[in-house]
């Protein structure tokens, strides 16, 4: 433990990231279960008052985005990128360790503060009414996590571009490397605006400035532009590492080479650019001019062909392959199916007239969660199971992992497909109580049952990972999933220690 905790070696730091992020996934999930249990019936079930409810979902959202999705991608990147580019470690190992150790600090600020601003912290509530010191702790926690991301991203970019083996051209590296490279570049472009917005939020709260206060010549909508300029690209920052992981899993378990490497690279680069062309589609109802909205509508639709290139690539790879549906592959394919659902719902939000109907309703909650809980988390879990024997040297219980997959898949589909319908029935998002009418009650109950099914799957998965790492049988590291080929899950051909 001592050796791993105070190490700066890339696999040790990667392992710390993975363990911390998975822990955050489980405790953040517990808050989600509390939210869904509260909404099982109208009125008060579990949570005493609306303020407590708002605190719970603020911390749930912040935790899942910045302490599960981002650190897990960094962890797998740390573990594999140096191996994939054939270098002995990350470019700056100590900086790498520092970037990791900032995360528990930010995590402590967020969890101990338990702010109620929502993860978006829109003014004027966040600047004038939100109780301190919780909101300040949230701001500083995110500051620290953002800095950690930036340091990690610089490290990845330099490692991939400058440390790779001279015999290895960039166009011969794994697509996981490309996913990490594009993600890291996006972090470097996107995060500074939110960093500025957080400082402005903080000084507004101190009463020193009035950036977002109309009575002092400020503009609350300006915050939304700063926020979404960071957090629309951030959605792709969550997504692309999972896409890179899918590119490792799907050819492997299809027992077939990837259909098209070039289109995968192209799609990564396109998504990296288009992610910045569509931030204000979150703001159609703020009173922008029709021309501005149309520009962002087109920018948003441009992401569809790029995402479709990835999907097509995966389907074409699986087509005619001898697919082995081991648990990692099942999670990958389940993620692709949920990605379809999520994308279809997103097209609706792109069209302005339809967005007016669904904006700030449960439709948006369902859409967003199908991405992050469906596509991204499924890709992450599949890849974690795939890497498990290589990390621990032991095998997990494959049958139990498949049970966990089906619990996840059925649960997630029940929760979030239902929430789309709830949105069409007019249930606003971020709501502590709702009108006791038949469709709302039934749909909320289906959604909550889905949450409990998913929680069972997550508990089972946690048990499988802990049991496997301590008591699992020793894995055959040449071919742990019995795919029928001798391989190493790395781009290197010769030993490189």
Image (tube, rainbow, N blue to C red):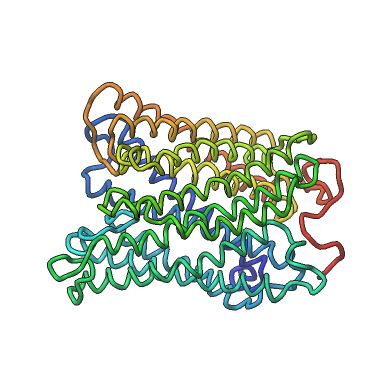
In this orientation, which residue lies closer to the viewer: 243 or 294? 294
* Residue drawn at (46%, 50%) of the image: 300
In this orientation, which residue lies closer to the viewer: 8 or 285? 285
Find residue 474 and report its horizontal and vertical position in percent. 78, 48
> In the rendered image of this protein, does residue 40 appear above or below residue 353?
above
In the image, 452: left or right of 268?
left
Find residue 261 and report its horizontal and vertical position in percent. 73, 53
Find residue 437 and report its horizontal and vertical position in percent. 24, 24
Q: Which quarter of the picture shows residue 194?
A: bottom left
In this orientation, which residue lies closer to the viewer: 221 or 405? 221
> In the rendered image of this protein, does residue 335 appear above or below residue 487?
above
Can residue 111 be seen by looking at this rendering? yes
Split into 4 quadrants, where in the image is the C terminus?
bottom right
* Residue drawn at (30%, 41%) of the image: 356
Split into 4 quadrants, where in the image is the N terminus?
bottom right
* Residue drawn at (32%, 49%) of the image: 284
Q: Which quarter of the picture shows residue 86?
A: bottom right
């Amino acid at each position: 433990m001592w050796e791993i905790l105070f190490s700066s070696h890339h696999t040790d730091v990667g392992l710390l990231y993975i363990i911390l992020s998975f822990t955050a996934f489980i405790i953040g999930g517990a808050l989600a279960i509390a939210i869904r249990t509260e909404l099982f019936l109208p009125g008060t079930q579990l949570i005493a008052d609306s303020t407590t409810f708002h605190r719970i979902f603020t911390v749930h959202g912040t935790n899942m985005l910045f302490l599960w999705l981002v650190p897990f991608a960094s962890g797998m990147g740390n573990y594999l990128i140096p191996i994939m580019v054939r270098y002995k470690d990350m470019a700056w190992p100590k900086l790498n360790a520092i970037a990791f150790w900032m995360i528990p600090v930010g995590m402590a600020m967020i969890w101990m503060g338990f702010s109620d601003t929502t993860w978006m912290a829109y003014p004027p509530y966040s600047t004038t009414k939100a109780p301190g010191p919780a909101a300040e702790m949230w701001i500083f926690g995110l500051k620290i996590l953002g800095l950690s991301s930036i340091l990690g991203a610089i490290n990845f970019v330099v490692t991939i571009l400058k440390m790779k083996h001279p015999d290895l051209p960039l166009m011969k590296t794994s697509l996981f490397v490309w996913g990490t490279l594009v993600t890291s570049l996006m972090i470097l472009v996107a995060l500074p605006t939110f960093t500025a917005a957080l400082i402005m939020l903080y000084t507004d709260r101190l009463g020193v400035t009035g950036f977002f206060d109309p009575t002092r010549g400020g503009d609350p909508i300006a915050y939304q532009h700063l926020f979404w300029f960071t957090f629309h690209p951030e959605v792709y920052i969550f997504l692309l590492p999972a896409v890179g992981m899918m590119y490792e899993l799907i050819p492997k378990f299809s027992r077939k080479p990837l259909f098209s490497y070039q289109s995968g690279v192209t799609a990564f680069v396109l998504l990296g650019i288009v992610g910045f062309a569509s931030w204000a589609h979150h703001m159609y109802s703020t009173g922008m001019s029709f021309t501005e909205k149309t520009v962002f509508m087109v920018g948003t639709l441009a992401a569809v062909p790029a995402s479709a290139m990835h999907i097509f690539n995966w389907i074409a790879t699986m087509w005619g392959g001898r697919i082995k549906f081991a648990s990692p592959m099942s999670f990958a394919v389940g993620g692709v199916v949920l990605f379809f659902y999520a994308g279809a719902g997103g097209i609706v939000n792109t069209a302005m007239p339809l967005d007016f109907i669904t904006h700030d309703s449960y439709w948006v909650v369902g859409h967003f969660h199908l991405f992050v809980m469906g596509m991204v988390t499924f890709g992450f879990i599949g890849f974690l199971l795939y890497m498990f024997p290589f990390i621990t040297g032991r095998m997990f219980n494959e049958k139990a992992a498949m049970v966990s997959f089906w619990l996840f898949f059925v649960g997630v589909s029940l929760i979030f497909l239902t929430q789309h319908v709830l949105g069409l029935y007019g249930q606003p998002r971020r709501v502590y109580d709702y009108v006791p009418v038949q469709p709302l009650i039934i749909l909320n109950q289906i959604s909550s049952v889905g949450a409990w099914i998913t929680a069972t799957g997550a508990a089972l998965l946690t048990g499988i990972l802990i049991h496997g790492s301590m008591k699992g049988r020793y894995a055959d590291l040449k071919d742990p999933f019995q795919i029928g080929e001798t391989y190493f899950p790395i781009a290197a051909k010769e030993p490189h220690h």
